[in-house]
């Protein structure tokens, strides 16, 4: 009977789109705004869907809506359907014109060197291919991957789910960096406590590296510096470190492309980040996405060849 309710013609695409938006936004107001519809229309569409299914998908509260167990499960199925339709549309376009297409990639920390190299290589091969890069927190990127709004994620691996598949590329070591002419680089010996005299760039709270930096300070019985900037933007980190006396924890690979930076002779600890590609389990990728994956693998191999001491193949 439940199967018949889903196939009797009442379930529409707008119901699936709304469920995805409601679970992401956590409120009817937010979902309506994201979908550019009025709140009454969003409420009515949700009521239609719950009537079709015969169950409540969300618990209503003063601050918004929370998916029930059934609502969370149904959201996963809705996102899978939307993702497959999105992929189908892209592949139809690519099969019509093999030289064109679109690939949407999510970028998290760890991708700022790998991804540009891969994109440059891909554009040389397929100049009419459109590459869209979206930066966000790992959690938000995972939701977009599940919903089919992005094709793959590039960068450091974070916690994964059964709906995600990893393609490891390499492991990167984290080191402590300053500009080459920083006062600390002029010293013969450096203790970790000396770093407390300078401003720090600390990763944002949504970053896995943030927790590791906090643990680093805790191991040395020091609080996080009061004089600090918190950001996950590579452009901000780069400029601040190059142009001032800031200290920051970054990938050891930075020295391959930034001669103005210097790794301090201090151990960050036995911390390695796996860097690679995350895709949705069971999803058929478009030719454009597969072409980008091949370019990412080639770029990772070149990075490894350039600095075998800094990275070890996964």
Image: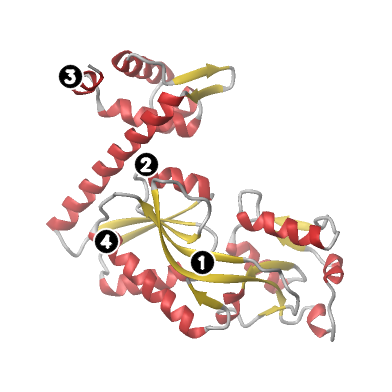
The mark that comes first in sequence, 2 or 3, is 3
Q: Viewer-proximal residue, 33 or 157?
A: 157
Find disc 2 in the rendering and name its residue. 147
Mark sitting earlier along the chain (4/2) = 2
Q: Secondary structure at mark 4?
A: helix
Q: Which residue is label 4 attached to?
A: 288
Residue where numbered disc 3 is placed:
8
Tell me the quarter of the picture where residue 76 sits: top left
Q: Is residue 62 left or right of residue 86?
A: right
Instruction: Report whether 138 appears left or right of 125.
Output: right
**What SS does tag 2 mark?**
loop
- Does 205 sit above or below residue 263? above
Rounded to the nearest angstrom, the CA distance separating label 3 from label 4 is: 36 Å
Q: CA distance from mark 1 to mark 4?
A: 20 Å
Taking the spot 16% from the left edge, 51% from the top edge, the residue there is 92
The reply to whether the C-beta atoms of the residues labelled 4 and 2 are less than 8 Å apart is no
């Amino acid at each position: 009977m439940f199967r018949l309710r889903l196939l009797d013609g009442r379930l529409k695409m707008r119901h699936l789109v709304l469920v995805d938006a409601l679970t992401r936004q956590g409120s009817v107001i937010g979902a309506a705004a994201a979908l550019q519809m009025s709140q009454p229309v969003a409420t009515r569409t949700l009521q239609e869907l719950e009537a079709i299914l015969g169950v409540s998908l969300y618990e209503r509260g003063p601050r918004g809506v929370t998916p029930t167990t059934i609502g969370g499960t149904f959201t996963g199925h809705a996102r899978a359907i939307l993702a497959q339709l999105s992929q189908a549309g892209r592949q139809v376009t690519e099969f019509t014109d093999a030289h064109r297409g679109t690939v949407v990639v999510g970028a998290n920390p760890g991708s700022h060197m790998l991804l540009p190299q891969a994109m440059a290589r891909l554009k040389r091969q397929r100049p009419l291919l459109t590459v869209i890069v979206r930066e966000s927190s790992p959690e938000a990127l995972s939701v977009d991957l599940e919903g089919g709004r992005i094709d793959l994620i590039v960068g450091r691996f974070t916690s994964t789910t059964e709906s995600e598949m990893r393609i490891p590329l390499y492991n990167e070591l984290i080191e402590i960096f300053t500009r080459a002419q920083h006062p600390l680089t002029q010293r013969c010996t450096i203790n970790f406590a000396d770093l407390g005299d300078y401003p720090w760039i600390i990763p944002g709270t949504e970053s896995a590296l943030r927790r590791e930096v906090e643990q680093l300070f805790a191991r040395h019985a020091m609080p996080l510096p009061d004089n600090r900037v918190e950001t996950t933007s590579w452009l901000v980190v780069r400029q601040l470190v190059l142009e001032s006396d800031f200290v920051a924890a970054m990938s050891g690979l930075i020295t391959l492309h930034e001669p103005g930076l210097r790794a301090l002779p201090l151990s960050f600890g036995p911390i390695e980040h796996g860097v690679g590609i995350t895709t949705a389990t069971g999803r058929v990728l478009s030719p454009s996405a597969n072409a980008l994956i091949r370019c990412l693998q080639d770029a990772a191999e070149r990075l490894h060849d350039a600095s075998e001491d800094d990275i070890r193949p996964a």
